[in-house]
Every structure is written in structure tokens, then in C-alpha cells.
Amino acid sequence: MKIQSISLNNHSEQNRIEMVDFYNEATEDYEFWSNDYNMHFGYYIPFKTNPFKRDSMLNQMNTQVLKRLKIGLSKNRLIDLGCGMGGTMRHALKLYKNIIAYGVTLSDFQVKQGNNLLKGENGIIIKENYNNTSFKSNSFDSAVAIESFCHSGHSYNSLKEAYRILKPGGRLVIADAFLKKEKNKLCRGSKYSYKKLCNHWSLEKLETHTYIQKSLKEIGFKSITVEDVSFKVAPSVLHVPFAITGFILGKLLRFKSIKKESLHNLKGSFYALLAGLHMKNFGYYIISATKSNTYN
Ligand SMILES: C[S@@+](CC[C@H](N)C(=O)[O-])C[C@H]1O[C@@H](n2cnc3c(N)ncnc32)[C@H](O)[C@@H]1O
């Protein structure tokens, strides 16, 4: 039992080191994916978002996640748990004048460049681990985690820490890909793309959405809603092959070499597309929950 837990910790630690290295080296490539440095997939609404304009869908994902926080008119302290370059924070600061936005990431590159993009705004990015932050308990009104908790394998600890730092009545909204069934029940093609995806994007593992729902409840969250938004996300996933081709051509035309981390990232995007095609096994979900009003 002890040996198993040591090797699990080693695996997590190794994954964390690789993930930080990956983001320090490959974050700048995301400019190709999104002018606003959104490091996530998008949300398509027929006749509202243009399916050919990637950034309009990526920013619509921000809007959808923020809408579910139910931000009122009073001052609102928002935290982005795994904030990347602060794309969601900047979008939130544009939409809501009453928020102060904090973001945490483990990548030094993202802290430096993300804070440059936030200059003059009511927001800051700090180098912190979202599984164990130094924030006081009950200090935030809102928390978001877009495609970030997957790096820690959708761990119970990430949800518990979000609960701790939220004020009673505070809201948590997670947008991410989840398994629709247990790992051992995945079909062969899904198992293959899942393994490759985790490896190339440094994801410790993915959990099922039912596990997240159960864990949130156990931790003390209430008003938990789980929405399968896979079909809304699909149009932006279909941009992947075009984005990859454009990125490589752009590099070749400027006689620039492609870093190994960038190649790793590109392959990861391809496996995300492959996994996305197995719709019975993988899905994209927005999960929202409220911290109960009693202090603990
Ligand atoms: C795919 S990016 C998403 C970034 C951002 N949420 C967005 O949508 O643009 C994943 C982010 O999670 C961060 N991350 C992963 N594990 C983390 C951890 N344990 N603590 C803090 N940040 C973490 C990475 O540094 C990266 O910024």
C-alpha cells in the first residue's frame, strides 16, 4: 500500500514538473490559437457566435462560465484556479466593473506575461498551486477553473481547496472534459486517445463527471449542476486541424524551427480531437456549485 502511494506521488510530481516546463515553453504558441490568449475550447451559440471566428467562441466560453457565477452588483472577489495568461480574468474585468480578479498558475512565464497583459486592470496573477493556496479561508465570492483541474487529475484536493477559499454562498464553476464512464470501460480507441492525450498535455488523468458531482456534494457544496455542453464545444474542437496546419506553415515560411514542447502540444491537440470523436466515452461539461452558507 505504501509503495503504491509513493509511486503515485512520484507520478504526480513528475507530471507537475513536465506540465510547468510545457507551459513555460509552449504558452506563447497559444497566440496562434487565440489573439486573447484563451487557452481553452470555445462555446458555440447558433446565430450568435461565428463558428469560423475561433476567438468569438473562446470568449463565449468565458462569458458562459462567468454567467454561472451569478455575479451581482456588489464587490466581487474572483479567483481563476489555473488561469493561464489570464484570458478569462481580462474578459471578466471587461464584463463586470465590480470585480477584483486573482489568478493562480505554476508557470513563471504565465505569471510574467499574464501580468503584463493585465497592466492597469484590477487583476493580478500569482504563482500558487491551486491544490494548496496561501489564501485565507472564506476569502472569495467566485472561483472558476477552465481546463485546469485536469492537470491534477480532477483531484478531490482541488475541489476541497476551492471550497475552503470560497466564502459561504460563493460559487465555483468548472469547465472541462470528463470521462463518461470508468477508465476500464472505455473502448479501445478511447483508451488509446486518452492515454496519448494525458501524456501530451501533462494531464494526470481525467475523472468521470459523476465522480466530480459526488465529491462536490461530499465536500459540502450545494446547488450542483452538471451540463453536458459537448455539442456547443465541438465546433471549436474542429478548428484543431486547421490551427495545427496554419501554425506549422507559419513557422516553415519564416524558416523557424518548432520547439519539442510545441510539437508535444500540437500532438496533444490532435489527440484531444480524436478523443472528442468518441462521444460515448468523453464529454465536455460545465459544472457549477455553491458553497453552503454554514462556516466549516
Ligand atoms: C489549459 S491551461 C488553461 C488556462 C486558462 N484557464 C484558460 O482557459 O485560458 C491550464 C492552466 O492550469 C494551470 N495549472 C495546472 N496545474 C496547476 C496547479 N496545480 N496550480 C495552479 N495552476 C495549475 C497551468 O499552469 C495553466 O495555466
Image: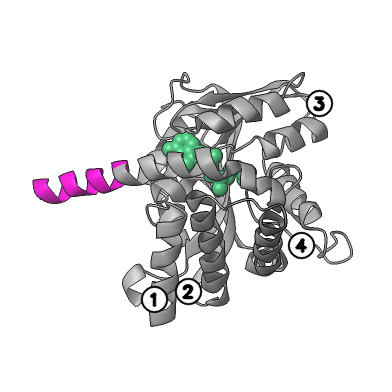
Residues under numbered marks 1 and 2 in contact, where contact means CB atoms less than 8 Å apart: yes
**Earlier along the polypeptide chain: callout 2 or callout 3?**
3
Q: Nearer the viewer, residue 293 or 57?
A: 57
- Residue occupied by mark 1: 186
Q: The magenta stretch spans which residues?
A: 1-13
Dot 2: what SS? Answer: loop
Q: Nearer the viewer, mark 4 or mark 3?
A: 4
Q: Which quadrant of the figure contains the C terminus? A: top left
Amino acid type assigned to the residue bearing label 3 in the image: Lys
Amino acid type assigned to the residue bearing label 1 in the image: Leu
- The residue shown at (67%, 54%) is 251
Dot 3: what SS? Answer: loop
Q: Is residue 94 left or right of residue 163?
A: right
Question: Horizontal and vertical percent for residue 110?
Answer: 58, 33
**Earlier along the polypeptide chain: callout 1 or callout 2?**
1
Q: Is residue 247 left or right of residue 277?
A: right
Cα separation, mark 1 vs mark 4, equals 27 Å
Q: Is residue 97 magenta?
A: no
Residues under numbered marks 1 and 4 in contact, where contact means CB atoms less than 8 Å apart: no
